Amino acid sequence: MDYDVLVIGGGQAGLAVGYYLKKEQFQFLILDEQERTGDSWRNRYDSLVLFTPRSYGALPGLALNGDPNGFPTKDEIADYLQNYAE
């Protein structure tokens, strides 16, 4: 398959770029060194919690579930990114 765009990195920025590329109907591929989307978050220390509220952590087109003023855990973010990519 031929791609119009190759995105290196499947974190928040890469996924957000993918969102806009899809809206514009580009053929693209997102590559990441991790096995699953969100693993860069899953592999961090267990007690990690974001220091910004959920309302600021959402990517375009998909809200981050939970209290908008609450602080998501690393696993919530990892699962959110996996869901976003799907």
Image (tube, grey):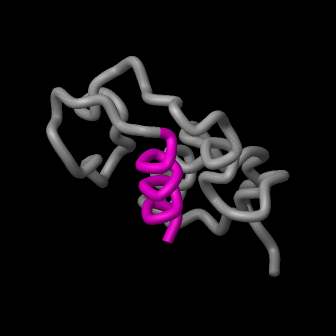
Residue that appears at 28% across and 34% down: 54
Q: Is residue 75 magenta?
A: yes
Residue that appears at 35% across and 37% down: 72
Indicate whether 66 appears above or below 71.
below
Quadrant the N terminus occupies: bottom right
- Outermost top residue: 51
| Closer to the camera in the image, 14 or 24 | 14
How many marks the image carries: the answer is: 0
- Outermost front residue: 47
Q: Is residue 70 magenta?
A: no
Seen in the image, is 51 located left or right of residue 25? left
Indicate whether 48 appears above or below 6.
above
Seen in the image, is 23 located left or right of residue 35? left
Residue 79 placed where, x, y %?
47, 58
Magenta stretch: dominant secondary structure: helix
Residue 46 placed where, x, y %?
57, 39
Residues rendered magenta in the picture: 74-86
Quadrant in the rendering for residue 45: top right
Residue 38 placed where, x, y %?
60, 52
Residue that appears at 44% across and 60% down: 84
- Outermost bottom residue: 1
Residue 10 placed where, x, y %?
67, 50
Residue that appears at 67% across and 52% down: 39
Seen in the image, is 4 located left or right of residue 84? right
| Closer to the camera in the image, 56 or 2 | 56
| Closer to the camera in the image, 85 or 53 | 53
Seen in the image, is 61 located left or right of residue 12? left
